[in-house]
Image (cartoon, grey):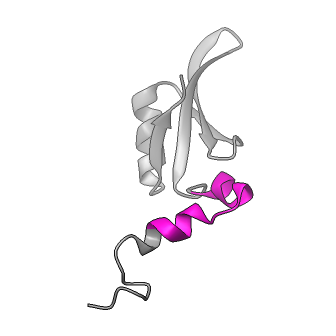
Amino acid sequence: MNHNGPTRPFAAADVLRQLAPADWARFGAEQLAYIRPVVVDGAHIVAIHSADGTQIGAAPDASLASAAILQHEMVPLLVH
C-alpha cells in the first residue's frame, strides 16, 4: 500500500483543509437547495433557494418543494 500518494488514508481530508473560504462558499452549490416557509400576499408557501441564497422556485408546501428539488437531482435542506 502506498502511503505517500493520493490514495493514502485521509488524503481527501487534507485537500479539503486547504480550500479557501470562497471555495467553501461554493461547495455543494449545485447539489443543495434550501426550503424556507414564507408568507407572500398573505399566503403561506415554501420558497426554494439555491445554496448561494438565490430563490429558484416556490411550492405550496414543504413536501411538494422537496419533491421538486429531488426531481432536479438536488438534496433538499430546511432553513429554520
User: Could you say which quadrant of the image residue 36 lies in?
Assistant: top right
Magenta highlight on residue 21: yes
Where residue 7 sits in the image (x, y, percent)? 37, 84
Query: Which image quadrant: the N terminus?
Result: bottom left
Where residue 42 sits in the image (x, y, percent)? 67, 8
Where residue 25 sits in the image (x, y, percent)? 67, 52
Residue at 43 percent of width and 88 percent of height: 5
Along the line of sight, the residue nearer the viewer: 48 or 20: 20
Left or right, 63 with respect to 20, comes to left
Range of magenta residues: 13-27
Total number of numbered labels? 0
User: Could you say which quadrant of the image residue 39 lies in?
Assistant: top right
Where residue 16 sits in the image (x, y, percent)? 54, 64
Magenta highlight on residue 19: yes
Left or right, 55 with respect to 4, comes to right
* Residue at the far top in the pictured view: 42
Residue at 43 percent of width and 74 percent of height: 11
Q: Magenta residues: mostly which secondary structure? A: helix
Residue at 46 percent of width and 42 percent of height: 76
Along the line of sight, the residue nearer the viewer: 42 or 34: 34
